[in-house]
Amino acid sequence: MRVFIKILLAFGLLLGAQSRAFAVVSIDVDLSSQSMNVRSSSGQSYVWPISSGREGHRTPNGVFRPHAMYAMVHSAKYNNAPMPHAIFFYGQYAIHGTNAVGALGSPASHGCVRLSPAHAAALFAMVQSQGAVIRITGSPDLQTAHARHASHSALAYAPVHRHRSLAEWAKNPAAR
């Protein structure tokens, strides 16, 4: 009887591991429409506006899997810029949140795929629990994007809170 229970338990674990292996979030990024279509294995489906790489900073096309994820990371390359809920998929390219939500829908990044903070947090949680396949296709229409972005002037500008870098902290840890 014990052997039968052990076999049944092993079979259940194997079956559970197989269903976990196929449970992935499908992330389809369309650079032409500056949108992201997200479908999870649990049936959730979303379409979100994004900002991809602007002229001279193209977002790579292809099929990728996440290779690193961080709830908060700062860009060492671009002035310590915050990258909340970063999902790295190709070298230093990532899907992450941005405070520049006014630019969503137009190419505006240095190559990363940027989302609103709330959408980035939701995507991060789904990918963390289920894994993901990321497909990036299309090409942004940079001429139209420049005209569209230039026609929308901001009504106000909020101050940007910048976190100090490790080097700045090392020079003066007590400074604010």
Image: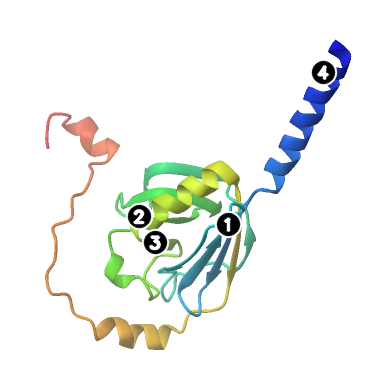
Q: Check the image and report above or below for 6 versus 22.
A: above
Q: Check the image and report above or below for 42 versus 18.
A: below
Residue identifier under label 2: 118
- Disc 3 to disc 1, how far (Cα)? 21 Å
Q: 172 left or right of 101?
A: left
- Disc 3 to disc 4, how far (Cα)? 48 Å
- Disc 2 to disc 4, how far (Cα)? 45 Å
Residue identifier under label 4: 5
Residue identifier under label 1: 43
- Disc 2 to disc 1, how far (Cα)? 19 Å
Q: Earlier in the sequence, mark 2 or mark 4?
A: 4
Instruction: Give how far across and how far down residue 102 sits, in percent.
Output: 27, 70
Q: Earlier in the sequence, mark 2 or mark 1?
A: 1
> Quick one: label 1, few (<14), some, or many (20+) residues within 10 Å?
few
Q: 92 left or right of 165?
A: right
- Closer mark to the observer between disc 3 and disc 4: 4
Q: Check the image and report above or below for 89 versus 56.
A: above
Q: Nearer the viewer, residue 30 or 165?
A: 30
- Disc 3 to disc 2, how far (Cα)? 8 Å
Residue identifier under label 3: 115
